[in-house]
Image (cartoon, helix red, strand yellow):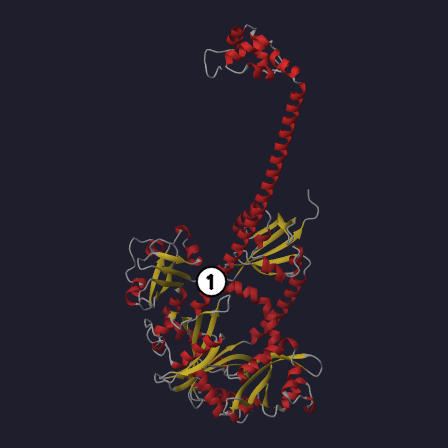
Amino acid sequence: MAEKHSGYSIRSVAKRIGIHHSYLSRLERGEYAPLSEERIRALSVLLGDDSELLMAIGGRLSDHIANLIASNPENFLHFVTSMEEQAEYSKNECLLRLTHRKEELETLTRLLRDEIHKNQILENQVREQEQIHRTILNNLRDVSIILFDDQLKILWSNTLISENSNSVLQNSHCESIQQKITHTSYDIVSLALQTKSIQNGTYQSPDGKHWLLRSAPIMDADAKITQIVHLQFEITELIQAKQQLEANEELLKLAIAGSRATIWDYDFLSDTITYEDSGFTMLGYLKKEMPLTRAGWMKLIHNEDTLRVQSTFELHANGYTEFYDCEYRVLCKNNTYKWIISRGKIVNRDKKNKPLRIIGTHTDITDKKIIEEKTKINEIFLETLLTSVQEGISVISPELKICYANKFLENTYSEFMPLVGKYCYEAYHQSKKHCKNCPTIRALNSGEKHSEIINIKNSSSIKCIGLNAYPIKDNSTGKIPGVVVFAQNITELQNIKENQILLSSIIENSQTICVIKDLDLRIITANKFLVEALGKTSVDEIIGKTDAEIFDIHLNSEAVAVCMRDELKAQTLSPGQFIDREETIIFPDKKIRVLHTQKFPIFDDNGAVISTANISTDITEKNHLKNAYQNISQKYKDLFENAPIAICTANAHHQYLSMNISYANLYRYSSTQEMMNLCNTTLDVFASLNDKIKIQNLLKNNNIVTKFKCETRRKDGSIFLTTRTIRKIYDQYGELEYYEAFVNEIFDSK
């Protein structure tokens, strides 16, 4: 009443109903203050409420209500019982409905959470697959690709198709399939559509080039073909090599006889295999112990390789592959297995194209496989190293706005993020207008690749950046919706070009032997290092002489014969080819020197060989150092791998390069490979974000961090305390090469 009417108060109300105000004060404080029936009725009139209700709330019953109860006690008792039962039922029913509703909501929440998690996993998988496919397509530089629908209409083709005049696709805007591909290609695509399987074939274009054709159907979940991918590879050189091989078969056999390969010959009609004698000895068998049938030979093949060998052989026998080529394991007489590479080709077929005879070779590649197995240890390191070699890649729109920029560019221009949506000259060159000879604009205008070299100056240096702009062509419209720009730091390359004028002086004064000989193997010129090594005072003393004359060796000696064979062979090499060998030579001062020599031909403007060049480096001391280094490296590797303390190395981005088994076991991983697959960086094992930030800040300002305590997480999620010492390892140029960390578990800690 006081809130509604400012004139009311405890005193005024008490006065109106004829009581002392202390009674109402006690009543307001929740204390028991009984009022008479007369006073309660006066209060109800003042409040405008039912007097009977106020008396019941105050714990009183009026005389009227008391008389009614007394006159009808059974009805009153039944009424009270009915109200209690109804209240209890309503309460229980409400609780049941609330409990049921809660369970439904919890179930629905759990199902929604699981569905969202599954969708996130699928979305990540699709994104990863899309990235893989994009990377593959971006690197298929020498392959023609056409994508058909199930009606053999072209949906897409890569730019190599329309740019290559010898391609089977002659008009990228034509709707008719017959105008786009040859009959041979059409047959391959049609056969793939009919058989729902991958089909291969060959084709010779009018210019004499040979092509390998391959059509692969893409099917949906109902096994219905939705698209067909058609690939075309040029195999002209392979065909020419094949023709030359057939023309010189006997010469090839002689060459194989001098190698580690052995020849086998299989007759399909008689089911008979014929081996060379070396084929028995390679596996340790006697001639009479070797199987003479194909089934007998298959029994010697390792169980894990049998199906693959059978499938590869049948594909070639049925004409689906040009050659038979397969690597597999074969059982030797001593019950061990050797890896061999089996190669062959069908040399004779009947009129129905059924194979009659195949000739091939077996080569022992066990040593190669052992080396491959050992190199797997370094694969992760090599992959990490290769991913760190990056170039800037961006996609520019016709309005010169950035549509895409890779991580390399984002890291390089992090202060100007986000790059997407900005003009390229604003983000990359901090300019208000485009570059004078912008390769992007030229590529947009011409539809061709354009390049440009720009110099970027900063406070300490000038960098040369090579820009290559490739237009993105829409074959359906002929428009260019954008340009892909590759940015590469070519400062070093430019420096090399600028220093080419010093090359002659460098060769003359280098500690490498440089010699040029005519086609009669006589010296035309040589640098000062060779003259001094021979104890001569002038190059004129050796010009016009052969090696035999200089070293006073008889022409019929083995050393001279080997040297002459190399020189004559070098005259037959193609551009870019060379002979590489180590030579041991006794110089006039009686010192024995080991030289690493490369011999290659020199051509005139018409492509004719006019002389040969020999470049030799004295590697005598290097060989000594190499042997010592290998011994030290092996010892260090043994110490690293077998050390009881946990040790790991990581690159500048804290990505694992290597770790020993103690490190993996500390975090409860069964192997180093498992931990490196599941943990990308050394920071992943930190349980505290503050520890991650703290250790990174310490490493920025210190070359070594010792006894850094932190909480780390094991594979099972448990947290434990460790102390680690981390040091920086620098290369010869003072650049950070990697981190080396030593980790100990803290067993006793407050």
Q: Position of residue 583 (x, y in %)?
A: 54, 82
Depth check: give the residue in front, 433 or 484. 484
- In screen coordinates, is 248 left or right of 458? right
Which picture quadrant has residue 214? bottom left
- Image height check: is 60 above or below 320? above
- In screen coordinates, is 136 left or right of 437? right
Depth check: give the residue in front, 705 or 431. 431
Residue 570 visible in the displayed image: no
Which picture quadrant has residue 359? bottom right
- In screen coordinates, is 225 left or right of 24? left
Q: Position of residue 114 (x, y in %)?
A: 56, 51
Q: Position of residue 374 (x, y in %)?
A: 61, 71
Residue 149 visible in the displayed image: yes
Q: Residue at x 56, y 67 (%)?
A: 379
Q: Which residue is mark 1?
A: 130
Q: Which three-letter amino acid code belongs to the residue tagged 1?
A: Glu
- Callout 1 secondary element: helix
Which picture quadrant has residue 592? bottom right
Q: Residue at x 53, y 56 (%)?
A: 121
Q: Position of residue 15 (x, y in %)?
A: 52, 6
Q: Residues within 10 Å of mark 1 (few under 14, many from 20)?
A: few
Image quarter in which the C terminus is found: top right
- Image height check: is 381 above or below 603? above
